[in-house]
Image (cartoon, helix red, strand yellow):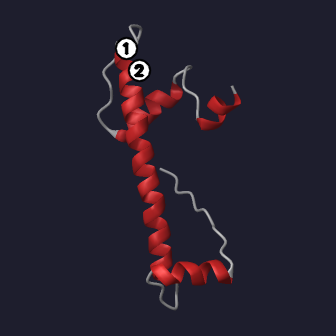
Amino acid sequence: MATHTKTISLTDLEQKILSNDLYNDTDNAGLDLWIQNAVDGKINNSWKRFQQEWTTKLMNDSSFTDPIPSNQADFVTLVTARSDYKNRKQRDDD
């Protein structure tokens, strides 16, 4: 599985504001950990919504007769390959 690296930019002011609440050492490891945890939390919540929405859709689709995958990677691959799947941008553009 590929790994994607994203970069964020903070001004000195924004970093000082965050450092008021977050443990931030000289190498910014505390801030980096908080950012990673925030992203991980968003991914987890998005996965829960994705899984719930698509499990229901698959179960209600009379033309879908295959087993629903029990692991995350296979489930996402199955759903995103369907012709009726649209990501957020595609749904908003419609």
Residue 60 shows which numbered tag?
A: 1
Residue 81 at x, y = what percent? Answer: 52, 27
**Secondary element type, mark 1:** helix
- Would you say 94 lies left or right of 42 here? right
| Residue hosting label 2 | 57
- Residue at image location 63% in from the left, 77% down from the top: 14
**Tag 2: residue type?**
Lys
Q: Are marks 1 and 2 in contact (CB under 8 Å)?
A: yes
Which quarter of the rendering shows the C terminus?
Answer: top right
Callout 1 environment at 10 Å: few (<14), some (14 to 19), or many (20+)?
Answer: few
In the rendered image, residue 88, in percent from the top left (x then y), is placed at 60, 36
Q: Which residue corresponds to the image point at 36% horizontal and 32% vertical from the top-left?
A: 52
Residue 69 location (% of width, % of height): 32, 30
The amino acid pointed to by label 1 is Asn
Q: In this rendering, is residue 39 above or below 46?
A: below
| Place of residue 40 in the rendered image (x, y in percent of width and height, measured from the top left) | 43, 58
Is residue 39 placed above or below 1 in the rendered structure? below
Label 2 environment density (alpha carbons within 10 Å; few <14, some 14–19, many ≥20): few
Quarter of the image where one finds residue 7: bottom right
Q: Residue at x 54, y 26 (%)?
A: 85
